[in-house]
Image: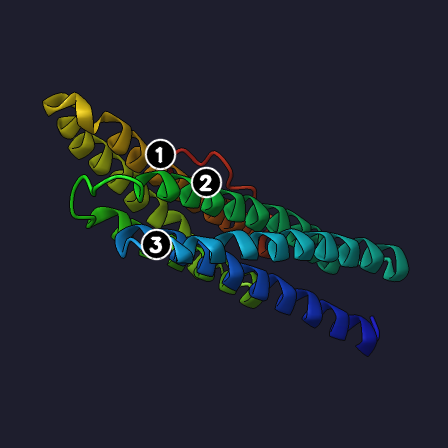
Amino acid sequence: MNRHFDEELGELKERLLYMASLVESMINYAIKSLVDRKEELIKEVYSHEDEVNKIQVEIDDKCLKLIALHQPAAQDLRFITSAMKINAELERMGDQAVNIADSSVKLLKQPPLKPLIDTPRMSEIVKKMVKDSLDAFVKKDVLLAKKVMATDDEVDGLKDQIFRELLTYMSGDSGNISRALELILISRHLERIGDHSTNIAEDVIFLVEGKDVRHHLGGEI
């Protein structure tokens, strides 16, 4: 392939990384608005949503043009098709961040139910999964991809821990139910973002090794 094609692949990588940084920001603003009780931060989430959606269309278009114009060979073709799948995963992560923001809007209209400790911790882990999964893709780093996949269990554990704690709040006072349910939903949205990062990590392993590790069911990868 010529140098122009290589440059276009480089631009594709950069756009995916930029899109990932926007998604990380959306998650951060959504959680920070809740923890710091600053509703103005939620506007940042919604404003980034439009940009993420535009970039998704741009990346898909770029991928299709690369395939049509250059007819790439096996490895490059796998890279481009993986980029298209990752693009879709990132857009879904942005949707989950918007869902978190929607719950935050509702929660900020009421007094705080409890100090938030595990939710911000969970969001930091998830944001790192997003970043690491994209870094693994760009660097074709299988070990980093496997690290992302292993972290998914930690996120699942935090989600379950949050659920159990909030269940006690709901059992103790029915007036806590609506706020507790929104916090449970937020943990589920964060968990889904972790799942999308894991999907990207699985794509990386397929890209590099040609090995399909979906539904590995806890076995050795």
Q: Which of 83 and 143 is in front in this view?
A: 83
* Amino acid type, callout 3: Ser
Disc 3 from disc 1: Cα separation: 16 Å
Q: Name the residue under label 3.
A: 33
Residue 123 visible? The answer is no
- Name the image quarter holding residue 219: top left
Image coords of residue 138 (percent x, y): 57, 65
Which label lies toward us, 2 or 3?
3
Mark 3 or mark 1, earlier in chain: 3
Asked which secondary structure carries label 3, the reply is helix
Say above or below: 74 vs 99. below
Q: Name the residue under label 2.
A: 99
Mark 2 or mark 3, earlier in chain: 3
Asked which secondary structure carries label 1, the reply is helix
- Name the image quarter holding residue 67: bottom right
Quadrant in which the C terminus appears: top left
Disc 2 from disc 3: Cα separation: 13 Å
- Residue farthest along the left direction in this orientation: 172
Image coords of residue 162 (percent x, y): 22, 37
* Amino acid type, callout 2: Asn
Disc 2 from disc 1: Cα separation: 9 Å
- Residue farthest along the bottom direction in this orientation: 3
Report the residue at 68% width, 50% height from top: 84
Left or right placement of residue 24 versus residue 175 in this view: right
Q: Mark 1 points at which residue?
A: 185
Report the residue at 31% width, 50% height from top: 34
Report the residue at 61% width, 61% height from top: 16
